[in-house]
Image (spheres, helix red, strand yellow):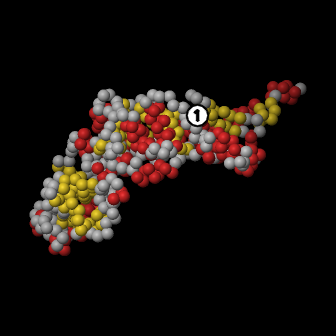
Amino acid sequence: MLDKLRKMFDDEVDSKDLAKERLKLVLIHDKINISPELLEEMKEELLEVVSKYIEVEANRLSIDLNQDDQSIALVANIPVKELRRRSLEDVSESD
Amino acid sequence: MQEDYILFKWEQGHLVIVLAENLDFKEILTRLKAKTRECKNFFVSSKIKINVGRRELTNKNKEQLIDIFSALPGLSVIEIINENINQEVNQEVKKFSDSSELSTLLLNRTLRSGQSIEYGGNVVIRGDVNPGAEVKAKGDILVMGAFRGIAHAGATGSEEAIIAAWRLKPTQLRIGNKIGRAPDEDDHLVEPSKPEIALVKNGAILIKDL
Amino acid sequence: MDGKAIVITSGKGGVGKTTSTANIGTGLAQLGKEVVLIDADIGLRNLDVVMGLENRIVYDIVDVVEENCRLEQALIKDKRYSSLSLLPAAQTRDKTAVSKEQMVEVCKRLKAEADYVLIDCPAGIEQGFQNAIAGADEAIIITTPEVAAIRDADRVIGMLQAEGLGEPEVIINRIRMDMVNKGDMMDIEDMIEILAIKLLGVVPDDQEIVISTNKGEPIILDDSNSQSAQAFKNIVHRLEGEKIPLMSLEEGFMEKFKRILGLG
């Protein structure tokens, strides 16, 4: 009972959910054969490209591989600080 | 020239290894060891016969030979053949055995599951024989330890052969063409507390005190 | 007769392939089916011990393929059901002693005489596995609620699909509902979602299985109706095409309710 209550109020994740998440990740990696290092490299490059256009919170960037029934999707979650309105800025500078 | 000291050939599903008679036994062992190390996968699951020609081997020699192969993966059967088998009789072992015309192999070790010994004579084992291990002998089988595996004495059909062990708790016994097995109900099974001997009497395998 | 050959496999070792093979085979024989069990784990045979038939082995599958004996001579009749027999593995040989083609041939000949040929597959995905699945028409995957076991099961499902055994079904073994209820073990839905194959049955973790294995008597013979015996009976009926709902493995709704309320 106490266990149950503690879990309800804590943020602590059930170990089964942990297992499930780890398993999903492992299986996806098994299938697409991308090493974590490679994924990290991809993340860096993505960040570089995206930062050219918009200001992002680099430290909150996350890249995940998600699987639904048939396909695997690469999901990049990049929180945006603000759009660099480059064209506008360009105009104002020229003024 | 060196190649000729140890000869490999296939004969009726067996790998026969012929050891030159005129080379020092120690030298033979060294060369054999080197050869087996070079191509250890060659020996996987083969039935091996080692032909030592007219060379007289002590039991220690035989063991050294077998040890070379027993370290290899997946090996199943080893047999040592002697072209003049009568020369080779060990007095110590002979005491236990009636069939004096057969040679006797003495093994100083425990046979574990999956290991098997096949020998064209009597076999004496100073150690245990565990479940899943197999001993097959043309003559008698004598185990100075607990016998829990499968024994086949008189493998070429002789029902005169015997199987004796310090503690006889076999999975299965075969003598000649007769087969006996442990009873299904564990409850009736009394742990043997004495050395016992199995032999064929009135067409069935009988176990009694040695 | 023209039966079917089903391979029982897992990838990971120690998840209960041999126990499941023994129980499903015995269960099918209880229904009057002609069943042959093949121990394909050459060099590490175990099915004979789980069935309590180890002291009857004279010839084995290697003797059959090397033609030291006829196929019928190597088949060991079960103690309890005459329609059940075992083709044992060799203990003193290794996986290379039987080829894929020989395995296919043995299965073909056995299928001609039996309703079911169940093949107990060795762990791993090497030659022993390849041989074991070669002669099979269908596959059953055994897994346990652990990350490593499910990962291996997923790998094996992929390999089976590549071999044309496209629709394997899964048995989830050793589940502990007390742990599932506390959130400490993946539940059935989680696992099926990940593996995306059909569920054949769920077998609870049961210490009675250890006892039955000690005795060499498959648990399905047990009349006391332990949960695991019932689980295997349900699996057998499902194999026979009956629609049997998953049994409730929870300690019963009321008890669970009580436990949540702190009364249990």
Residue farthest along the right direction in this orientation: A95
* Residue marked by disc 1: C193
Question: Which residue type carries mark 1?
Answer: Glu
Q: Nearer the viewer, residue B40 or A21?
A: A21
Tag count:
1
Q: Please indicate whether residue C31 sits to the left or right of residue A17 in the image.
A: left
Q: Residue at x 58, y 46 (%)?
A: C176
Q: Residue at x 21, y 43 (%)?
A: C69
Residue B191 rendering spot, x and y as whole percentages: 34, 64
Residue B20 rendering spot, x and y as whole percentages: 16, 62
Can residue B90 be seen from the camera position used here?
A: no
| Chain of the residue where label 1 is placed in the rendered structure | C
Q: Residue at x 39, y 34 (%)?
A: C31
Vertical placement of residue B151 versus C162, above or below: below
Q: Residue at x 40, y 48 (%)?
A: C217
Q: Label 1 crowding class (10 Å Cα cut-off): few <14, some 14-19, many 20+? A: few
Residue B8 rendering spot, x and y as whole percentages: 20, 54
Vertical placement of residue B105 versus C255, above or below: below
Can residue C139 be seen from the camera position used here?
A: yes
Vertical placement of residue B92 versus B49, above or below: below
